[in-house]
Image: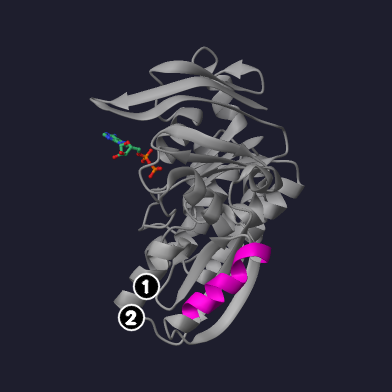
Amino acid sequence: MIEVTNLSKSFNELQAVKNLSFSIKKGEVFGLLGPNGAGKSTTINMMSTILSSDTGSIQIDGNDIKTATNICKKLIGVVPQEISLYDEFTAYENLLFWGQLYGVPAKELKNKIENVLELIGLSERKNDLIKTYSGGMKRRINIASAILHQPKVLFMDEPTVGVDPQSRNRIFEVVETLNQQGMTIVYTTHYMEEVERLCNRIAIIDGGNIIAQGTLAELQKESSVKETVTIQFQSISANQLTALQKRFRIVVQDTLSLTIACDINKELAAIISFCNAEQLQIEDLTLNKVNLEGIFLSLTGKQLRD
Ligand code: ADP
């Protein structure tokens, strides 16, 4: 459905996207996962005709976006990071505007607006002004406006950033429903949980490069870290943390919990003994297969989260 070949983009001296190649099959939810500044928006903006590339090509359903731009624009829907709605108009009026802009025939438009409002769960608020909406509700209307013309491909750039949990869950359900209806979706995020829940295939991007791609199972298989243990402590001092950091490979660090890369059969006992020797009280302990955060760390030496 989408072929990206040797795609590059620089902003002055900074090369934001470096020679990326990947393909996305029809009906997939494809995730671009990476930390802030990795090049996700630049990539998705080039794929959705918002930004032109320096080199490389992008084909959507066999159409080159540079030579067949208008055909491509009809095939795609775009949910950008910035909310593009008129505050002083109602949600319904905003959707009328976007539907007309996308060339949805007038006699179909009202029906389509009702359907997308139902899908995003905002039918009852349709006559309220956008300025009365929460950030999450605005984002849902943004998604609705991008799918009114029933695109084959939907590009979503970090659609859950700054969104309340209720809207976030609704956005996940919308992605799942649209995908079940056959839509191909390209989804960028720095939240690995979202990619694990929604995406069939993933490209991990860092510093403008794709550093790994495949299904979650493929990425886990290739990862040098296979398993992790997450330990919740009662309390932990800076010295105790430093001692653990020196001795073990910490993948994720929260206030009182640490996720450590380990071979469970060989190293778990040593980790527990070390905690005992450091007089660390363990509250809870869970064993897991490595997740995308661990894979990212093993590939880059950095945490995915800031
Ligand atoms: P991400 O979406 O992964 O957070 P971006 O694609 O937004 O990353 O940014 C990649 C890099 O390109 C960053 O270093 C960012 O500061 C830079 N960048 C993005 N857009 C511009 C721009 N319009 N002008 C200059 N630098 C930019």
Quadrant of ligand 1 in image: top left
Is residue 105 something one can see in this rendering? no
Q: Main secondary structure of the magenta part?
A: helix
SS category of the residue bearing label 1:
helix
Question: For the point 57% across and 56% down, which residue is it?
Answer: 194
Comparing 162 with 254, the one in front is 254
Question: For the point 60% across and 65% down, which residue is it?
Answer: 267
| Position of the C terminus by quadrant | bottom left
Is residue 130 toward the left or the right of residue 6 in the image? left
Q: Are marks 1 and 2 in contact (CB under 8 Å)?
A: yes
Mark 2 CB near ligand 1 (8 Å cut): no
SS category of the residue bearing label 2:
loop
Give the crowd class for mark 1: few <14, some 14-19, many >=20 residues within 10 Å: some
Specify the segment rendered in magenta: 265-275
Q: Which residue is mark 2?
A: 237
Marking on residue 162: none
The x and y percentages for residue 114 are 64, 56
Q: Which residue is mark 1?
A: 241
The x and y percentages for residue 9 are 37, 24
The x and y percentages for residue 251 are 48, 60
Residue type, numbered disc 2: Ser
Residue furthest out toward the left: 12
The reply to whether the magenta stretch includes residue 126 is: no
Residue furthest out toward the top: 67
| Position of the N terminus by quadrant | top right
Q: Where 286 falls versus 26 (above or below)?
A: below
Residue type, numbered disc 1: Leu
The reply to whether the magenta stretch includes residue 267 is: yes
Q: Quadrant of residue 184?
A: top right
